[in-house]
Amino acid sequence: MNYLQTIILSIVEGITEFLPISSTGHLILTSDLLKISQTEFQKSFEIIIQLGAILSVVVIYFQTLLRKRKIWEKVLVAFLPTGVLGFTLYKLIKHYLLGNTVVVLLSLFIGGIVLIILEKMHNEEKSKLDDIEKISLKNAFFIGLFQSISMIPGVSRAAATIFGGLYLGLNRKTAVEFSFLLAIPTMLAATVLDLYKSHLSFTSYEYLLLAVGFAGAFITAFVTVKYFLRFIQSHTFVPFGIYRVILAVAFWVLIVR
């Protein structure tokens, strides 16, 4: 992997991390298009640069996180299912699911259809929870269960948590913001676990690639988060569902087949 490919992947990560279209899936598909082999380093790269995108949320919500510390209780409770399952299933996820194009395309396609159906069923006017602090610990845990499904590449962590929130009565903005915050411990834990499992056995060149990817993902995600929050104020998630289906079909027909 060269620096140009690294920059392209970091931009893809920054744009897709918080949208319900699967950043991991897009990184895998982009790597296929760029003819980048799914080596152990490449898989680690795809995990670690996501933390760069997540740090943009820390910057944007820094004051909120300081003032409203009870939010952390809910975020950490929601993180528990993914934390336990991610640690337990780490080898399965990294060695058999990450880098699997077929799994990604199936997840994108099925997830897109589910996204459209759930959005059509959702009634924004009846959504009573308009503040993260109103989320109960029980509901936070259930949203965490939804997030754990996203360990399958292509499902989308954002999609799973957002629609878990909508199903439990959150309005769109609150569901999206909780999804943003839940990404902090989730991706921090994923990065630390991967660094530990890989024994930091990267070359100096690979460390440089990680640094470039990390920075690129942070900058791109910072802009994307602000735009996405404005977008969902007046739009549904249906366009993202349609995009997922079209992408999966097009990639299958043009590339895989």
Image: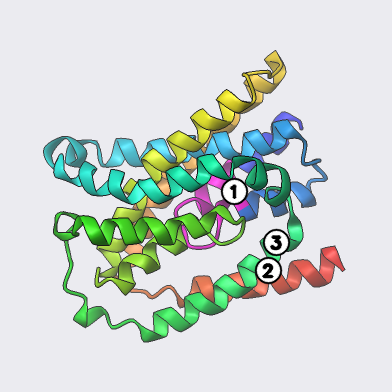
Magenta run includes residue 113: no
The residue identified by callout 2 is 106
| Image height of 172 relative to 189, above or below | below
The segment highlighted magenta reads 10-24
Crowding at mark 2 (Cα within 10 Å: few <14, some 14-19, many 20+): some
In front: label 3 or label 1: 3
Which residue is most to the front? 88
Q: Position of residue 145 (x, y in %)?
A: 40, 59
Q: Amino acid at mark 1?
A: Val
Q: Secondary structure at mark 1?
A: helix
Q: Earlier in the sequence, mark 3 or mark 1?
A: 1
Residue occupying the point 17% across, 65% down: 130
The residue identified by callout 1 is 12
Magenta region, main secondary structure: helix
Q: Position of residue 81 (x, y in %)?
A: 41, 50
Quarter of the figure that contains the C terminus: bottom right
- State the separation of the CA atoms marked 1 and 2: 20 Å
Residue occupying the point 25% across, 68% down: 170
Q: How is the image coloured?
A: rainbow
| Image height of 117 relative to 52, above or below | below
